[in-house]
Image: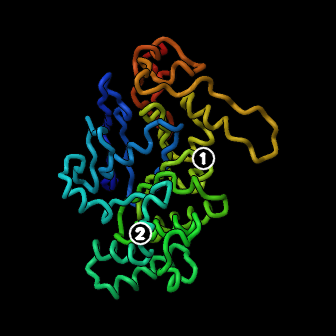
Amino acid sequence: MSEPLLKIKDLIVEFPTRRALLRAVDKVSFEIAKGEVLGVVGESGAGKSLTGAAIIGLLEPPGRIAGGEIYFDGQRIDNLADEQMRHLRGKRIAMIFQDPLTSLNPLYRVGEQLIETIQTHLPMNKKQARKRAIELLDEVGIPAPETRIDGYPHQFSGGMRQRVVIALVLAGEPDLIIADEPTTALDVSIQAQIISVLKRLCSERGTAIMLITHDMGVIAEIADRMAVMYSGQIVEIGKTYDLIKNPKHPYTKGLMGSIPSMSGEVKRLVQIPGSMPRLNDIPSGCSFHPRCSKVFEPCYSKRSPQIKVGQSDVACWLYSEEDKK
């Protein structure tokens, strides 16, 4: 086995407040190999985006990494100085945000922003950078890139703006892309095109992608493996096909059961009772136990470790032989 490109070990993200210390990400661990797509799913507030922000060093204060380790290409990066992290960010690790307008300056032409980014990361003069910018716009599917390069962000549709953002991300030729809900605000046909661009990146460039989304259709289409997050923890991680067809954790089963079938079979969708707990009111033991129909004694007081079940790792006492005795 080759060394993973990204390795997260027991990551903890906390937010200190006047009343309490809120733990938003609680001992999250996973790996991503070169050229692999890891889909991260879960309800809003599960800690998906915070995990991505922690990796790239963009946590909003007072949020902070309070524990754990992050390794990128064998180097530990969670303890790097700001200046060192800036050199890494954009060049080797890049992020695609949900709203492309937050990544584009509305006062500057698209070409100016691309050229500046290219020259920041690659040894090119302005003429070479403009040629490269046109190539990138063409690569992500912008029609007539020679003309559109001189347009302003407001002259592009939502889908086209997201393509421009992907071109900006590709400008530094990163090894890892963290894509945070990159297709949420787009219609289905544009979503398919953006997914196609991301898939091509993996196959042609060997780029690794951490895809954060709540859209199971997107995950099924592009992700090699899937991690399911709940209340700041990974409750199940494994191959995408296995988790969709044969989920193990009660929460994952609830998520899969809530997806309508396209086969024409009419059956009642699964409903998970209750809602995800607030950060200041996370229950002891397994944080999912107040909503779980399979809850039993150890769930109330102890958090389950990751247990190997088939090809997946599941944080659930149902699969612990020790606690079944």
Categorize mark 2 by other alpha carbons within 10 Å: few (<14), some (14-19), many (20+).
many
Q: Secondary structure at mark 1?
A: helix
Please report the residue visible at 28 percent of the width from the left and 72 percent of the height from the top.
120
Q: Is residue 258 left or right of residue 24?
A: right
Residue 211, above or below 116: above
> Measured from the top left, where is residue 63 in percent x and y?
31, 38
Residue at which label 2 appears = 168
> Measured from the top left, where is residue 21 in percent x and y?
31, 26
Residue 251, above or below 261: above
Please report the residue visible at 57 percent of the width from the left and 43 percent of the height from the top.
242
> Measured from the top left, where is residue 313 in percent x and y?
45, 36
> Measured from the top left, where is residue 249 in percent x and y?
54, 30
Tag nearer the camera, 1 or 2: 2
Residue at which label 1 appears = 216
Categorize mark 1 by other alpha carbons within 10 Å: few (<14), some (14-19), many (20+).
some
Residue 95, above or below 324: below
Tags 1 and 2 in contact by the CB under 8 Å rule?
no
Residue closer to the observer: 287 or 225: 287
Residue closer to the observer: 88 or 306: 88
Identity, as a three-letter code, of the amino acid under mark 1 = Met
Q: Earlier in the sequence, mark 1 or mark 2?
A: 2
Please report the residue visible at 50 percent of the width from the left and 56 percent of the height from the top.
99
Q: Is residue 324 left or right of residue 128?
A: right
